Amino acid sequence: MTHLKKTPLDLLDDIYSLAYWMTGSEKATADLVNMTYVNVNGNAAETELLKTFRACYVDQYGQVAELCISEKECKPHVTLVEKFREWSADIKLSVLLSEISGLKHDQIAEVIGRPVDTIRNWLFLGRRILVRDMQLKASA
């Protein structure tokens, strides 16, 4: 069985869907998709495009803050809340990469930079959270 290589242009719909699910806003989605495609090579592989998307999402929505007292002591300062935001975003992105893009666990692990077992746990947890969230919205 041969695997067709998808170009970044072939993945535009998937990237747009991922961005919309991650941001919930059409304007933010357009900005995120544009930023992703500006920062990616025209013939990049699918995983490279998705890594770029994740990096752009993290850059755009500020998952890491810096606390600088002086230039010499400027080090990243990550609070617990910021780590939870990053963790939450990665769980949501894992589920969306699986469901929208159809990536396998090892491909998602490569994009997010976590072990495959962590991705499996996140997919289980993330799907349950998304289902529960949709049920709450439907009942409201």
Image (spheres, helix red, strand yellow):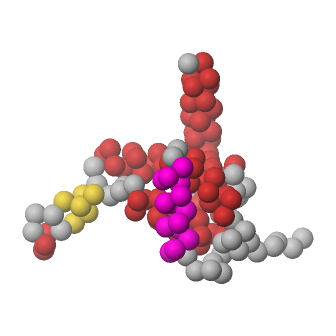
Q: Is residue 87 left or right of residue 53?
A: left
- Is the residue 88 above or below the residue 128 in the image? below
Q: Which residue does the image show at 69% across and 49% down from the upper left?
A: 99
Q: Which residue does the image show at 48% across and 53% down from the upper left?
A: 28
Q: Is residue 47 visible?
A: yes
Q: Main secondary structure of the magenta part?
A: helix
The x and y percentages for residue 72 are 13, 74
Which range is magenta? 26-39
Q: Which residue does the image show at 56% across and 71% down from the upper left?
A: 37
**Which quadrant holds the C terminus?**
top right
Q: Given the current orientation, which residue lies at the most extreme front position? A: 27
**Between 37 and 3, the one nearer to me in the picture:** 37
Q: Given the current orientation, which residue lies at the most extreme top position? A: 139
- Is the residue 32 above or below the residue 98 in the image? below
Q: Is residue 54 left or right of residue 132?
A: left
Count of numbered marks = 0
Quadrant assignment, res 76: bottom left
Q: Is residue 118 visible?
A: no
Q: Is residue 49 left or right of residue 67?
A: right
The x and y percentages for residue 105 are 66, 56
The x and y percentages for residue 93 are 56, 52
> Magenta stretch: residue 48 in it?
no
The x and y percentages for residue 116 are 60, 57
Q: Which residue does the image show at 69% across and 65% down from the upper left?
A: 11
**Which quadrant holds the N terminus?**
bottom right
> Magenta stretch: residue 30 in it?
yes
Q: Given the current orientation, which residue lies at the most extreme right position? A: 1
Quadrant assignment, res 19: bottom right
